[in-house]
Image (cartoon, rainbow, N blue to C red):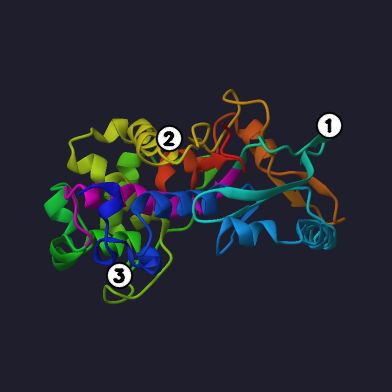
Amino acid sequence: MSADDATSDQLPSSAQKNAGLPRRRVLQGLAAAGLGGAAAIPLAGSARAASSVDWAGFDRQVRSAFDQMRLVGSAVAVVSSDRVVHTLTLGSRTVQPRRPVTQQTRFRVGSTTKSMTSAFVATYVDEKTLAWDQPVVDAWSGFRAPTDELTRTLTVRQLLNMASGLGDPPGPDPHLGVPTPDEVVHGVAILPVLTEPGTFFYNNTVNALGGYLPLLASGVALGDLGAAYANAVAERIFRPVGMTGARMADDPRGLVDDYSDGHVFDLRAKARSGLSAHMRRRGRPWPASRTWPRGSGCSCVRGCR
């Protein structure tokens, strides 16, 4: 099946409302929604509708909210189904020294990466190498859930929809090291069973396994999952929609110079560097690097071309 022939019953539930659009446009919408540095706002309608918008007034409202929230730096993209129609950059990407946010500033986009992961898995469903309601163990024989019944019955859809009924462990303690992809996918077997499958429970671990599953099904070794996932998403998602500079790279140091630090507020309500200071203290990448499918997207509002 070609990318433009996809129908609603082959899309993940989160994308079924877009079933009237060809797959390429669905991918563009998902990627744009995740890759706008601070926010990406879908714009319904045609190019004529976009040209009639009072963008100066829009920018004033965004700037006002930015100031009221005392944010440090932000990039906003307004998108239609197939293009970026307006962008706005605000503030600084670093506090000391002050460096302005640009259209090429890479932002870590966090858990919006999950939408890219779902789109990535959807490409394998289109190719019929996976199916949404296929048992995970049928795709990868190494899969183990906390019970024999769940091992037999959990589906690809339930991983991506976070409807496995399994709980998620607390975030990794940096003093104890960061779990490898091997530890993440095998760690599903020791997750607590909270309820029957079909009930939503936010779960980074099962989502990460869902993102890795097409690669595991094709025989990629556990030790190669991280790099294989980053390369496959670039080939199947970023390049087709023109976002050739986007990365699955939570730690952009060494890749680009123009990137945004994370920031937090101290008790005096003064902004200070957050993630970057933490990374400097630890001397190694932020923990999400080991679980790329769940939250390690890094891009800018113009796709970093």
Can you tell which mark lies on residue 239? 2
Name which residue type carries label 1.
Answer: Pro
Closest to the camera, between mark 1 and mark 3, is 1
Residue 207 place in picture, x, y as percent: 36, 55
Could you tell which of marks 2 and 3 lies nearer the N-terminus?
3
- Disc 1 from disc 3: Cα separation: 48 Å
Asked if marks 1 and 2 touch (Cβ < 8 Å), the reply is no
What element does badge 1 sit on?
A: loop
Task: Please report the bounds of the magenta region as a residue range.
Answer: 108-132
Give the residue drawn at x 58%, y 31%. 252
Query: x%, y% of residue 138?
Result: 12, 53
Q: Nearer the viewer, mark 2 or mark 3?
A: 2
Q: Name the side, left or right, on which 26 lies relative to 5.
A: right
Queried whether the magenta region covers residue 94, the answer comes back as: no
Label 1 or label 3, whichever comes before in sequence order? 1
Q: Amino acid at mark 3?
A: Val
**Where is mark 3, residue-wise?**
193
Percent position (x, y) of residue 194?
33, 73
